[in-house]
Image: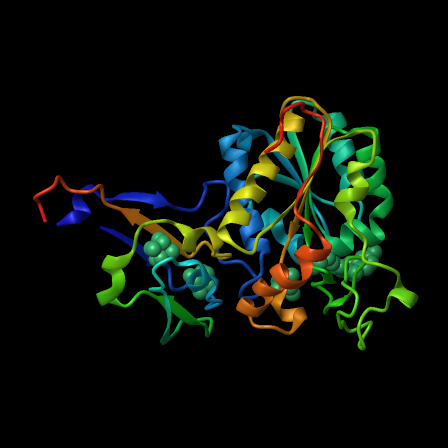
Amino acid sequence: MSEMNEKLVFDRPKAVIDRPTHYCPGCHHGVAHRLVGELLEELGVFEDTILVSSIGCSVFLYNYLNVDAVEAPHGRAPAVATGVKAARKDNFVFAYQGDGDLASIGMAEILHAANRGEKISVVFVNNTVYGMTGGQMAPTTLIGQRTTTCPSGRCLEHEGAPIRMTEIIAGLGGTAFAARGSLDNVKNIRQAKKYMRKAFECQTQNKGFGFVELLSACPTNWKMTPVQANERIQTEMIPYFPLGVYKDTDEGGAC
Amino acid sequence: MSRIAVQEDRCKGCMLCSTVCPVQIIVQSERFNQSGYKVAEVPAEDMEKCTGCTSCALICPDLAIRVYRTPKKKKGDE
Ligand SMILES: Cc1ncc(C[n+]2csc(CCOP(=O)(O)OP(=O)(O)O)c2C)c(N)n1
Ligand code: SF4
Ligand code: SF4
Ligand code: SF4
Ligand SMILES: [Mg+2]
């Protein structure tokens, strides 16, 4: 029989704790967690990592990643991470934030941390809503998208245009790397992981601030099945939030 | 031969795995797990079609899939 020499070619990374998550079916936070876990191991920083988690559905990230962690007040993860890194220069420090956390209440903290060129890394999960609190409009909500606080769809005239964070972060002096990936298919997931590796390496190689946006689904608040929500990323999100590298100070370092 | 193993107590029945399988062998079973989700499965007769590509595991948000590959036997063995 073949079992004798069969090889396990895919298993969970050690950095991701073996326990069920509280996420809804088809929520991409789980994919983002796995990519983070794999990279912490592959970059050899797993034992030295300090996570700064944020407020949103991923608030319990410290229960899922087997690393030390600090829970930041809403939006303040980049400021907390700045402090952690200042106190623990030899540790790998990263923040993990949603779009409500990072682009609404936390807009000041993320911009200034990037602009100062803090040697921290930020993983930004953009699912175009406040997932945790029931799907209110976020700065990233698309025009026409219905949410509990814009029930007839986001209106350009009243609410302004959805904010493209990666483009803004890329324009700041301290940013070493900024890219936008997506978690909707295998090719994009592999590419997103390459971007995350680059962003993390800005810290391990002491280059500056590293930022990666991950387009993600929130099937529950989009009121879609997981498969429909996953498709929406391709049909509605990517056209407005184009994927790619927006800043890379590392010459010849395109990924 | 390759195969996958779905950890049924972790599966949430989202079926994202089925959207990326190149040989389309992952389906939703009629079984509910303890959390009330209808779990994903590969019918036994289809498992031999698995290429071991790991796509399903890469997209599974719940890390519910393990992928096994068996190195090809020397020619003439099969
Ligand atoms: C100071 C403060 N204001 C408001 C809230 C309520 N609140 C909790 S999570 C959240 C938004 C989270 O959205 P996002 O960052 O996009 O994360 P997601 O759940 O979508 O992953 C808000 C407004 C809070 N917890 N604290
Ligand atoms: S509400 Fe949305 S973001 Fe939160 S766990 Fe559910 S699918 Fe994920
Ligand atoms: S490993 Fe590839 S071929 Fe096998 S079930 Fe998963 S997606 Fe399909
Ligand atoms: S992707 Fe994972 S959780 Fe979703 S149906 Fe497949 S095995 Fe289950
Ligand atoms: Mg959100």
- Give the image location of residue B38, x and y in percent: 42, 73
Residue found at x 64% / y 22%: A205
Residue closer to the observer: B9 or A159: A159
B11 relative to A38, above or below: below
Display colour scheme: rainbow
Left/right placement of residue A217 relative to residue B34 reads: right
- Give the image location of residue A72, x and y in percent: 75, 46
Residue closer to the observer: A51 or A31: A31
Left/right placement of residue A50 relative to residue A74 reads: left
Counting the numbered discs, the total is 0
Quadrant of residue A118 within the rendered picture: top right
- Give the image location of residue B41, x and y in percent: 34, 66
In the picture as drawn, the residue positioned furthest to the left comes out as B76
Task: Point out the image quarter for the C terminus of chain A.
Answer: top right
Residue found at x 13% / y 39%: B74
Mark yes or no: residue B10 visible: no
The quarter of the rendering in which ligand 2 is drawn is bottom right
A40 relative to A133, above or below: above
Quadrant of residue A80 within the rendered picture: top right
Residue found at x 75% / y 69%: A145
A217 relative to B51, above or below: below
Mark yes or no: residue A41 visible: yes
Residue found at x 73% / y 28%: A119
Residue closer to the observer: B52 or A242: A242
